[in-house]
Amino acid sequence: MTFPPLREELRGLQPYGAPQLPLDQVPVQLNTNENPYGPSEECADDIAASVRRAATGLNRYPDREHVELRTALAAYLSRDTPHGVSVEQVWAANGSNEVMLQLLQAFGGPGRTALSFAPTYSMYPEYARDTSTAWVQGRREDDFSLDLGLARELVEAERPSVVLLPSPNNPTGTALQPEAVTALCAAVGESGLVVVDEAYIEFRRAGTPSALELLPTHRNLVVTRTMSKAFAGAGLRLGYLAADPAICDAIRVVRLPYHLSSVTQAAALAALRHAPELLGKVDELRGERDRTVGWLRERGLQVADSDANFVLFGTFDDRHAVWQALVDRGVLVREVGPEGWLRVSIGTAGEMMSFKDALSAVVEEKR
């Protein structure tokens, strides 16, 4: 027996994570889809004061139902749907990663299947693996859209317990149309869930709706979100979902006791009070994204249409060599997605100029 006595299917695997390189070596870091604009001093002061108040009661366990936070999240989500969202429909956890893991713990497991369509978020099969859920992966079209006929056929053949559909999709930035969500909710039926992962939804282009609008129509629909991206809260670690109250009740069975600390709840509530400010740079980032898409296409590169705060571009015969050459010039992007493609997060105007200058130099060298 090899020590430590790790589960056999985990042996030899490496932990998930994007490269983290020192800022003094690579000053322009555009690889993890963070919001480049941090909270203001006023917002930071409110968070600090809120955490200070919570700290006086750290001898007591936090509200395990995080009712005040769920109420605030429900109010925020209600802005994106004419139907509104109630506190009973909301659940939160430590990042949307934990939300997804709890969903797989509750609705996946041995003898059950989770399904998605590649290319997609690379953590999904890890959630399945960690919960001993079988993993099935369909394929997207060349433009990264879904062929609904083929998608329905796969769902009907595999009968998954959970279908994971990011919208906008990571790493491609592709948004789902409402008819895709409706079709797959119908195909899955009440024997499974359709989870629409809206981590980047605040960056969507005009006219792209949120799946929240479909919640009253589909009991088996779950919409997940995060404060890590548009909310400039990657360090906060707060994810949440909206779903039928029965789904939220089921998650309570698998959640760890007091899983959201008093400090996390206080900081998230303070951040929500400053939502207009924290989201204030979203329009600017959208504009920078669209300009970046145009710039890349003008140089003859392929670019996926994006409703997110990142752009997938290519294709390169040796994408790793391009990635490394950019790093050597102080710019870090992500080597992810289909072979030949790279993904750049949208940063400040200055950061994007550095990216463009570096990429121009790299492409010129390789001609």
Image: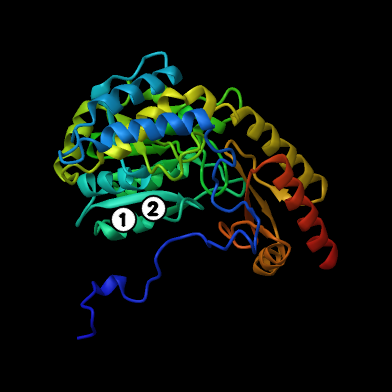
Percent position of residue 311, x then y: 64, 46
Q: Is residue 222 visible?
A: no
Q: Is residue 10 visible?
A: yes
Left/right placement of residue 326 relative to residue 166 reads: right
Mark 1 crowdedness (10 Å alpha carbons): few <14, some 14-19, many ≥20 = many
Q: Quadrant of residue 338?
A: bottom right
Percent position of residue 20, x then y: 53, 61
Residue at left 54%, top 45%? 34
Q: Quadrant of residue 133?
A: bottom left
Q: Secondary structure at mark 1?
A: helix
Q: Are marks 1 and 2 in contact (CB under 8 Å)?
A: yes
Residue at left 67%, top 41%? 348
The residue at which mark 1 appears reads as 128
Percent position of residue 353, x then y: 76, 47
Amino acid type, label 2: Tyr
Tell which of 269 and 160 is nearer to you: 269
Q: Secondary structure at mark 2?
A: helix
Picture disc at residue 124: 2
Amino acid type, label 1: Ala
Where does the C terminus fall, quadrant-wise? Answer: bottom right
Tell which of 338 and 155 is nearer to you: 338
Mark 2 crowdedness (10 Å alpha carbons): few <14, some 14-19, many ≥20 = some
